[in-house]
Image (cartoon, rainbow, N blue to C red):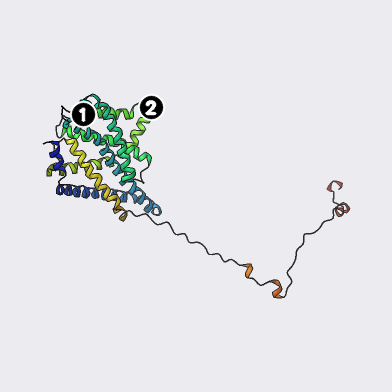
Amino acid sequence: MTFDDYIKHYTDTKSMLLFLALALAFSVICVFYILMVVSISARFVDRSERKQFYYEKAHNTIQRFYEMVFAGASILSFLAIYYIIDRFVPDSSLFRKFWDNWKDFLLLFLILLSIVVNNIIDRLLIPLKKVTKNDRGSVRLLGMVYVLLIFAYIKFIYENDNYDGFIMYFLGLMIGRFVYFDVSFRESIQTFIEAMKNFPILILGLAYTAFMAYTGFGSGYLLIGNGVLVSTFIAHLYMIVAIFIIHHSHFMYIFARKPKAPHVKRAEHVRRDYDDEPEYEDLGYAEPKYEDPVYDEKEYDDLEYFDPDEY
């Protein structure tokens, strides 16, 4: 199949809608699974703080799951583009010569571009306001493990050795993320520990990807002929669209509503307003007038004081 044949296959309207419906259905299942787990963990929290804990934890966990999908998709994007260019660009074209000479630098450019795309997705397209800066960094780091496991699945399950060069390059990129000259071993371990706190989300993201791959390849919509890596990236595009629909429909707010602020009863104090009181003259009494006493300093000189030392 030519590149145009692949484009025609993947843009079939009926197939696109069915695959999007599958992505949307499993995305909803993942959200409900997270809500169920958070609901169970909320039972161990004090009753007065339970609703607030459930709201904050549910939204934070769901959005970290979204960030995991975005991180995986952004990494797969530059690898898929690299694979498509390297495979489908004709050898006789001028761009092929340029690509062969500068593809390593172009790959670095694609990596930087994927980071920009990731920021656009999770900050503008689907704003993840409940994810902290530390959460975002640790989830993106774990996204590298996420893609590495996908590579392992492609190599050992599909027995496809076409991506060995990518795997070695990606391993070097991942090791470089942990080990460089100004980072101590303790800091590297701490960074890895923070990332592994999101390990359950990693498993859930891999389950989501496995479901999309299984249904996509099984139905014939995703094709092995154009590369398993490219097909996996296409599946992630549908996953992002499904997340976009769920996020902006505010679907999960039905099950994780923001708790109302506690109502504080304010004591009503009875206050007398003296402006409304009748004047002293109205009652027949003269208003007492107080004057500051005037002391004569000479009087103090005439006073005799008791001196205890005399006795």
User: Residue 292 location, x and y as percent?
Assistant: 77, 59
**Residue 196 seen in this snapshot:** no
User: Residue 126 location, x and y as percent?
Assistant: 31, 46
Contact check, label 1 and label 2, Cβ < 8 Å: no
Q: Is residue 191 above or below residue 260?
A: above
Circle 1 or circle 2, nearest the eye: 1
Residue that carries the numbered disc 1 in the rendered image: 95
**Residue 75 seen in this snapshot:** yes
Q: CA distance from mark 1 to mark 2?
A: 43 Å
Residue that carries the numbered disc 2 in the rendered image: 184
Q: Is residue 258 above or below residue 183?
A: below
Q: Secondary structure at mark 2?
A: loop
Q: Quadrant of residue 234?
A: top left
Q: Nearer the viewer, residue 57 or 283?
A: 283
What is the three-letter code of the residue carrying label 2? Ser
What is the three-letter code of the residue carrying label 1? Phe
Crowd around label 2: few <14 · some 14–19 · many ≥20 (10 Å): few
Q: Earlier in the sequence, mark 1 or mark 2?
A: 1
Q: Quadrant of residue 259?
A: bottom left
User: Residue 189 location, x and y as percent?
Assistant: 35, 31
Q: Secondary structure at mark 1?
A: helix
Left or right: 183 as drawn, with respect to 161: right
